[in-house]
Image: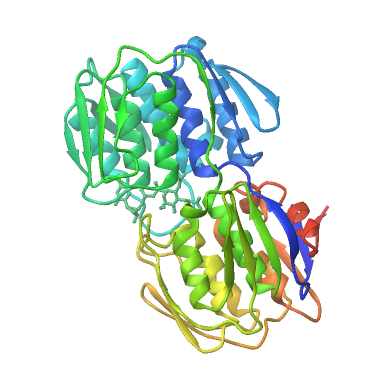
Amino acid sequence: MSKLCIQGGKRLNGDVIINGAKNAAVAILPATVLVDGISVIENLPNIDDVAILNDAMRSLGAVTNFLDKHTLEIDASTVYQHSALDECISKMRASYYLLGALLGRFGKAEVAMPGGCDFGGRPIDQHIKGFEALGAKIEVVDNVIRATADKLIGTRIYLDVVSVGATINIMLAAVLAEGTTIIENAAKEPHIVDVANFLNMMGANVKGAGTDVIRIKGVEKLHSGKYSTVPDQIEAGTYMIAAAITGGDVYVRNIIPEHMESLSSKMREMGVEILEGDDYLRVIAPDVLKATNVKTLPYPGFPTDLQPQMAVLLTVATGVSTMIEGVFENRFQYIEQLKETGAKIQVEGNKAIIEGVENLKPTHLKATDLRAGAAMILAGLKAQGGETVIHNIKYIDRGYESVEEKLAALGANIYRKSSN
Ligand code: EPZ
């Protein structure tokens, strides 16, 4: 069990290069099952979730090969298995994308009920609604989802909840279906557009991704090809906040600035200067951060995956801020940890009231999930007068590539220590 050790108080300066998006990669890798041939996926983040999905693809019979640490070649023409029940797969939420992909290609799929971060109830009723509307029969027995269909037929599907996972999963099941599928009230996140672009690169006919109505005209089959994933909006946002909380001046590079608009505007309200280039943002911290109010919403609203990181920034802003979690029912578990640093936060249902303090105290903190882990690092970068130690960092490795190397290159005093 490794841990991260941080001596806070260092201003971050310099350039950080952002990797490909985790939430695009963990959808595109299962989507390669739909290709009766070879997919070469570039700009993949070198993270645990990608490694687990690579193993999952191999367990289905695909032949895979890392051409370098960010490029994976997958030959899915050899896939013969329709069952992905391995425990390490089910731990990942994105394992549910194997359902849509296997059902779409073979008309049958068996996947364990997905795990993932605990944010209260995370049902998949909208995924099932979509698959059943396309003509599939769905059974859930002993925590295993079985989906079968003689033929998938395109239809109109209205999502009762704006869901990233359901939007993508229905898209995967619909690309080889007969006729046209229309997904209404679809989610619009950048990684949804990225999955649609990947599928279209392989010969699919998906229109409207990025809007709330997506039209998928079924095609015979998908062909081999190469694709490069979109930059990671959430990794970029995490480093933008790291620059602001340390009083730094950082160029966050290899990003699509438009994807960061909701965060940039909130940081500007706090007095942070943000200068925009074609594929970078320069973040210059003010002497004093001002309080503000944030509510998380589906894209293009403020991303829930930056909620814990932004809350940490608000703990050292002058005045009282509020953070409302508008996507998940319970995503404030990390706050008990944060209070250990002296942060002043009160939670009322899905609202956190944050009274700014001068500084945070170094202490031992536990990562309770991926983004909460990133938030604990930000608290450690700010806390002065001793060492902050972060435990359970396996959560962080699931979604951030080389986090301590990247931060150290910006001037942070951070290192990984294995505890054996
Ligand atoms: C995806 O999760 C991301 N995970 C999450 O990122 C992210 O927080 C979330 O989208 C929202 O942006 C991946 O992409 C692998 P949803 P997902 O379906 O698909 C409800 C991270 O840190 N809902 O958009 O599970 C649901 O309970 C992770 O990278 C239903 O009610 O999220 C939630 O309240 C954490 N029924 C809301 O919709 C359904 O069938 C949004 O969930 C599906 C969802």
Residue 136 at x, y percent in the picture: 23, 25
Look at 65% across and 88% down and name the residue there.
358
Residue under the image location 67 percent in, 81 percent down:
360
Q: Residue 218 in the image: x percent, y percent?
A: 26, 20
Name the residue nearer the viewer: 417 or 377. 377
Total marks placed: 0
- Tell me the residue at 67%/55% (across/down): 393
Q: In the image, is 403 to the left or to the right of 169?
A: right
In the rendered image, residue 238, in percent from the top left (x then y), is placed at: 59, 60
In terms of depth relative to the viewer, which is nearer, 82 or 169? Answer: 169
350 above or below 135? below
The image quadrant that residue 134 belongs to is: top left
Kindly tell me whether residue 168 is visible in this rendering: yes
Q: Where is residue 181 in the image (x, y as percent from the top left)?
A: 21, 29
Rendered residue at 52%/54% (across/down): 257
State whether residue 375 is above or below residue 117.
Answer: below
Which corner quadrant of the image does residue 144 belong to?
A: top left
| Above or below, 13 relative to 269 | above
Residue 188 is left or right of residue 267, and the answer is left
| Residue 217, placed above or below residue 269 | above
In this picture, residue 5 sits left or right of residue 265: right
Asked whether 172 or 103 is in front, the reply is 172
- Residue 392 visible in the shown view: no
255 on left or right of 390: left
Colour option used: rainbow
Q: Which residue lies furthest to the left in this view?
A: 156
